[in-house]
Image (cartoon, rainbow, N blue to C red):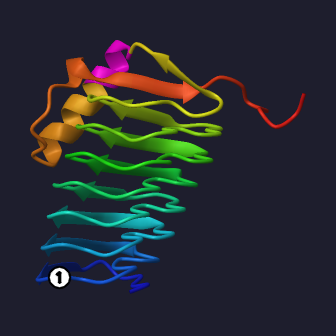
Amino acid sequence: MGIREEAEFILNGRFGDFVGALNHGPRIEIHGKTGRYVGNNMTSGEIVVHGNADDGVGFGTYNGTIVVHGDAGDGIGQLNKGGVIIIEGDIGDLAGLYMLSGDLIITGDAGKDLGDWIIGGNIYVAGDFETGTNAKVVEPEKEDVDKLSALFNQYSVDASPEEFKKIQRKEIRPFYG
C-alpha cells in the first residue's frame, strides 16, 4: 500500500502477498488469511490479522506492530530492524534470521533455526523451538514480562508472559573470527 497518512482499514476476505507492505502510519485490520510478506519493510503503523499468514511476516520491518492471531509460515521477522511482531500461534523455520532490533513474539511452537545469525533484538517464544547460529536462550527479566503483558493486553493475545523463553544474540560480531 505505501500509505503515509493516518487512516484505518478494515478488510474482510483472503488477501495475497505483500498486504501492508511499506505501511507508514495506517492501522490495517484483516479478517481472513493472508499471503506472504505481510508488512514487508513497514516503517510505522499497525497490522492486525485475524487468521493465518503465510511466509515472511514482518520481513525487513523498521518500526510499527504486526499481530497475527493465527499461525504463520517460515521466515517470520527476518531482517527485523525495530518492529514488534506477535504471532498468536505456531510458526515455521528460520524466523528472526539476521534480526537487528525489535521484538518477535511467538505464543506457540517455532521450527528450526530460530534466531539464526541474530545481531540484535529479542525473540520470545512459549512453545518448542530449536535455536540457530549465534542465538542463546536466557530467562526473561521482569521488564520483559511487563512488556509482554502490556502487549498481550493491548492486542487481546491469550498467553501467559511467565511461560516464555527469551532468545538473544551470543555475540555482536558473529561473522568475524
Relative to 148, does residue 52 appear above or below in the rendering?
below
- Residue 102 drawn at (x, y percent): 48, 44
Q: Identify which amino acid the numbered label 1 is placed on.
A: Arg
Q: Is residue 155 magenta?
A: no
- Residue 103 drawn at (x, y percent): 43, 41
Residue sitting at x 65%, y 39%: 117
Q: Which residue is mark 1?
A: 14
User: Can you say which quadrant of the picture contains the C terminus?
Assistant: top right
On the rendered structure, is 107 left or right of 167? left
Relative to 141, does residue 70 appear above or below in the rendering?
below
Q: Decide: few, some or many residues near mark 1? Use Cα within 10 Å; few <14, some 14-19, many ≥20.
A: few
Residue closest to the eye, 26 or 79: 79
Residue closest to the eye, 40 or 2: 40
- Residue 160 drawn at (x, y percent): 15, 25
Q: Is residue 142 magenta?
A: yes
Q: What segment carries the magenta color?
A: 140-145
Residue sitting at x 24%, y 83%: 15
Residue sitting at x 28%, y 37%: 109
Q: Main secondary structure of the magenta part?
A: helix
Relative to 8, does residue 83 appear above or below in the rendering?
above
Residue closest to the eye, 156 or 108: 108
Snapshot quadrant of residue 170: top right
On the rendered structure, is 20 left or right of 160? right
